[in-house]
Image (spheres, rainbow, N blue to C red):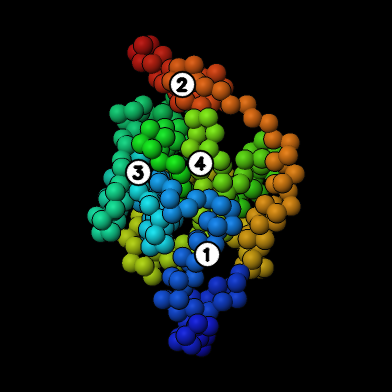
Amino acid sequence: MRKCVKCNKKAQVYLHAHRLSLCGEHYIEWFENRVERTIKEFRMFTKKNKILVAVSGGKDSLSLWHALTKLGYQADGFYINLGIGEYSQKSLQKAKSFAEKYHLTLHTLDLSTEIASIPELTSYDNRPACSVCGSVKRYYMNKFAREKGYTVLATGHNLDDESAVLFANTLSWNVEYLKRQYPVLPEDDGFVRKVKPLCKISEKESALYAVLSGIDYIEEECPFSEGATSIDHKIYLSQLEEKSPGTKLRFYSEFLRKMYPLLKESSKGNLQKCEVCGEPSNNSICNVCRLKLKLISQKEKI
């Protein structure tokens, strides 16, 4: 029987990648300390910053929000209703219940009133649903954070997410994307600072924290994520992790330590303002305004 290395009680958790046995209480402590260390390692923010946490109702974003508030940071939540039927209704309720339980501020935005629901948008765009959804969410998260005076936007991307994206970008040697794969994207003209405090915490570790902390989160995956290539990449990396614990963390950490500094040196900005809405964009017209123009064009044909 494994025992907690901190208090010698029966261990509830064994972290293979760290060779660490912990009871529930000390696991929660370990998780929060790891979040704090990651924040300090990458100089993400301080207690003086006003932080907006992108909340989905899932384990990662709610665990992040919970940990930040326990650590003493000023953190409010922001939920975007994507209009994906029952899934969105359920995830919104989870986010609201969490905010009410811990007396936290949750801002919400209904995508249907801003542009259109994700199911409608995907019918007008040839890109995969996740690409459309991602670009729209990034646009409104940044816009809302800036307009409401938040200096930092925090997302719940975990180690599994980051290593899978890194794997995909390395397979295709997408240098432009690799240049931006860092836990901190600094504030720029029109952009607030974006950070990923869970980047060194695995999906399982995040789920364990949620369960042990009594966080009620939506367990269903977004129906539009079915068949996404990123899921396959996560499976491949998880198989490697099973055979060699610590593989994902080593893969991601060594990229940040050895490769990212080289890529950063060659990085050139191409930021401009969208001619339609004035938001920062890599093109003369941003992705969201392009979608809006497509919607208008299609509706005029009907």
- Mark 2 vs mark 1, CA separation in Å: 38 Å
Which one is in front in this view, the residue at disc 4 or the one at disc 3? 4
Specify few, some or many for label 2: CA neighbours under 10 Å numbering under 14, 14-19, or 20 or more.
few
| Mark 2 lies on residue | 278
Q: Which of marks 2 and 3 is nearer the N terminus?
A: 3
The residue nearer to you, when weighing 94 against 232, is 94
Type of residue at label 4?
Arg
Looking at the image, residue 242 sits to the left or right of residue 93; the answer is right
Q: Is residue 34 above or below residue 269?
A: below
Looking at the image, residue 167 sits to the left or right of residue 301; the answer is right
Which residue is at a point 41% across and 28% down the rendered structure image? 121
Type of residue at label 1?
Arg
| Mark 4 lies on residue | 193
Labels in figure, total: 4
| Mark 3 lies on residue | 79
Image location of residue 212, percent across then percent down = 38, 70
Q: Which of marks 2 and 4 is nearer the N terminus?
A: 4
Which residue is at a point 49% across and 78% down the rendered structure image? 22
Where, by quadrant of the figure, is residue 107 drawn?
A: top left
Per the rendering, the mark at residue 34 is 1
Which one is in front in this view, the residue at disc 3 or the one at disc 1? 1
Which residue is at a point 28% across and 59% down the rendered structure image? 102
